[in-house]
Image: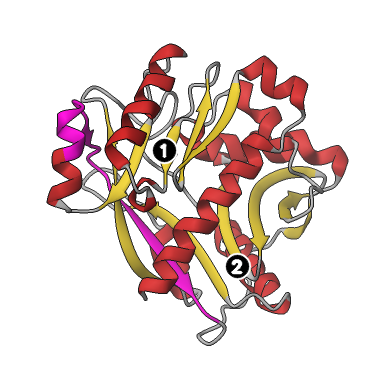
């Protein structure tokens, strides 16, 4: 399990680094997107995006000089006037909590669970009544708009998501109702590890099995591609903020392999326009 957790952390970092760092250079400049790597840690910074997913520090627990790296990261956010960000660290670890406290950061109220499965385990047949297929290039913007709505990525970030359609390493799926894109999902694959990076459904088409169908299709595709590990992450369900994603993933054979805290400024909220911390996968 420890190996699975390490690889789950690694592939999440690789996926989001590819979304940010692999975008066309003019788009990166327009949004103020930067990727920094220090001593094993990765900082994603998007000066003109509100989304926390593009403003966070990952892999700090692998850094040899975590105090120095954290200080450098906070300076980078401050210089760019980025006020909403996450610093991810092991859950319920007193040493990490003390380090964050020294920098006036607190644990966000909703930790994230990491989930993973190997090649053995249950398969779930796809449900739903809508067509599931690869996103066409002409659907890239519509696909990204649906996904951005589920992940609370503001309109400026839609182009960053759209740029991954047909990019090597990515699987981008749509659920269609006729010709309308009503569901969207992404999966990133590298070195035999798959990351279920995100999925969302339009509000008008929820409770029709689309999320489960998108999830099952990606798991099946990852296994067919020979992946040895399939991973994801989602927010822990807390009172007033339900999250069915974890249960859906467990139905597809993923199991919880670890928990991470997201440290941030005391006044930080996840969402700017949707339910706080929904983060469907």
Q: Nearer the viewer, residue 166 or 22?
A: 22
Neighbor class of circle 1 (other Cα within 10 Å; few <14, some 14-19, many 20+) is many
Left or right: where 171 falls relative to 63: right
Q: Is residue 200 above or below residue 273?
A: below
Q: Quadrant of residue 125?
A: bottom right
- Is residue 207 visible to us here? no
Q: Quadrant of residue 230?
A: bottom right
| Residue 128: image tag | none
Question: Label 2 belongs to which residue?
Answer: 193
Label 1 to label 2: alpha-carbon separation: 21 Å
At which x and y percent is residue 7?
48, 65
In the rendered structure, are the residues bearing label 1 and label 2 in contact, judged by CB atoms less than 8 Å apart?
Answer: no
- First in residue order: circle 1 vs circle 2: 1
> What residue is rendered at 57% in x and 58% in y?
196
| Residue range corresponding to the magenta coloring | 99-118
Magenta residue check for 106:
yes
At which x and y percent is residue 215?
58, 63
- Visual colour scheme: secondary structure
At which x and y percent is residue 120?
53, 87
> What residue is rendered at 71% in x and 41% in y?
143
At which x and y percent is residue 128?
63, 64
Q: Secondary structure at mark 2?
A: strand
Magenta residue check for 113:
yes
Left or right: where 78 falls relative to 145: left
Neighbor class of circle 2 (other Cα within 10 Å; few <14, some 14-19, many 20+) is many
**In what quadrant of the picture does the N terminus appear?**
bottom left
Q: Nearer the viewer, residue 107 or 147?
A: 107
Most distant residue in the bottom direction = 120
> What residue is rendered at 42% in x and 23% in y?
272
> What residue is rendered at 21% in x and 35% in y?
100
- Is residue 180 visible to us here? yes
Question: Label 1 belongs to which residue?
Answer: 57
């Amino acid at each position: 399990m420890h190996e699975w957790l390490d690889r789950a952390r690694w592939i999440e970092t690789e996926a989001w680094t590819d979304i940010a760092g692999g975008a066309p250079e003019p788009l990166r400049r327009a949004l103020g997107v930067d990727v920094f790597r220090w001593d094993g840690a990765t900082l994603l910074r998007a000066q003109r995006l509100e989304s926390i997913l593009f403003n966070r520090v990952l892999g700090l627990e692998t850094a040899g000089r975590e105090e120095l790296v954290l200080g450098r990261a906070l300076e980078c956010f401050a210089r760019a006037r980025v006020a909403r960000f996450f610093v991810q660290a092991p859950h319920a670890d007193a040493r990490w909590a003390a380090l964050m406290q020294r920098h006036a950061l607190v644990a966000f109220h909703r930790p994230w669970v990491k989930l993973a499965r190997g090649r053995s385990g249950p398969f779930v047949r796809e449900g739903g009544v809508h067509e599931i297929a690869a996103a066409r290039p002409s659907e890239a913007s519509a696909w990204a708009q649906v996904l951005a709505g589920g992940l609370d990525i503001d309109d400026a970030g839609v182009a960053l998501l759209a740029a991954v359609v047909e990019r090597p390493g990515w699987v981008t799926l749509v659920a269609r109702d006729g010709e309308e894109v009503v569901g969207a999902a992404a999966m990133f694959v590298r070195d035999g590890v798959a990351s279920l990076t995100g999925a969302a459904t339009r509000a008008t088409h929820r409770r029709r099995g689309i999320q489960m169908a998108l999830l099952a299709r990606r798991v099946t595709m990852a296994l067919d591609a020979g992946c040895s590990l399939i991973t994801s992450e989602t927010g822990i369900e807390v009172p007033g903020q339900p999250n069915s994603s974890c249960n859906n993933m467990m139905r597809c054979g993923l199991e919880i392999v670890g928990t991470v805290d997201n440290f941030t400024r005391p006044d930080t909220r996840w969402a700017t326009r949707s339910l706080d911390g929904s983060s469907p996968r």
